[in-house]
Amino acid sequence: MAKTIHILNGPNLNLLGKRQPEIYGAETLADVEANCARLGAELGLTTALFQSNFEGGIVEMVHRARDEAQGIIINPAAYTHTSVAILDALNTFEGPVIEVHISNVHKREAFRHHSYVSLRADGVIAGLGIQGYELALRRMATLLA
Ligand code: DQA
């Protein structure tokens, strides 16, 4: 049976393509979803993409992934830098976790340089645009092979 990867996205990422395109690019979250579904099919992985603007919504997505997914790709957006609750939720997940940031957070404001989620993530991708999600998916395929 195909393994399932949940791709979780935090606040404001529903506005991808419209939101600060000079930083995040012109492509939308629907493009991310389509690209990952296409690549997932090639790699033999089923993908499901979710987004929430609420911290508790993301915590509940992680709980759902515990039952439904073998791996998590997560862009927690601004909660990356603030959320112990999301870190704690990820610590209850047994499979691989890859953290993705569209922008290079290390080239930006100092408050973006720290990530709670990195304390759990098996890998981190930053600054590669939305292609970072597909690269994370390729790594998932290797980790779950
Ligand atoms: C982001 C970087 C975060 O610092 C920011 O709050 C976001 C998006 C990224 O994908 O580059 O909302 O996670």
Image (cartoon, rainbow, N blue to C red):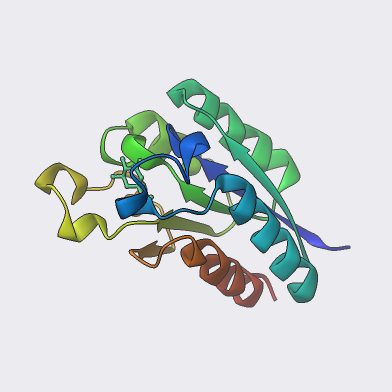
Left or right side of 110 for 38 = right
Residue 128, image quadrant: bottom left
- Please determine whether, in this image, residue 49 is positioned above or below residue 78: below
Question: In the displayed image of the protein, which residue is found farthest to the right?
Answer: 1
Residue in the picture at 53% in, 71% down = 135
Q: Could you say where residue 82 lies in the image, as x and y percent from the top left? A: 27, 33
Q: Quadrant of the N terminus?
A: bottom right
Split into quadrants, the picture shows ligand 1 in the one at top left
Of residue 118 and residue 105, the one placed in the foreground of this image is 105
Q: Could you say where residue 15 lies in the image, as x and y percent from the top left? A: 48, 36
Residue 18 seen:
yes
- Please determine whether, in this image, residue 51 is positioned above or below residue 27: above
Of residue 17 and residue 97, the one placed in the foreground of this image is 17
Q: Quadrant of the C terminus?
A: bottom right
- Please determine whether, in this image, residue 54 is positioned above or below residue 113: above
Residue 91 seen:
no
Residue in the picture at 77% in, 75% down = 42
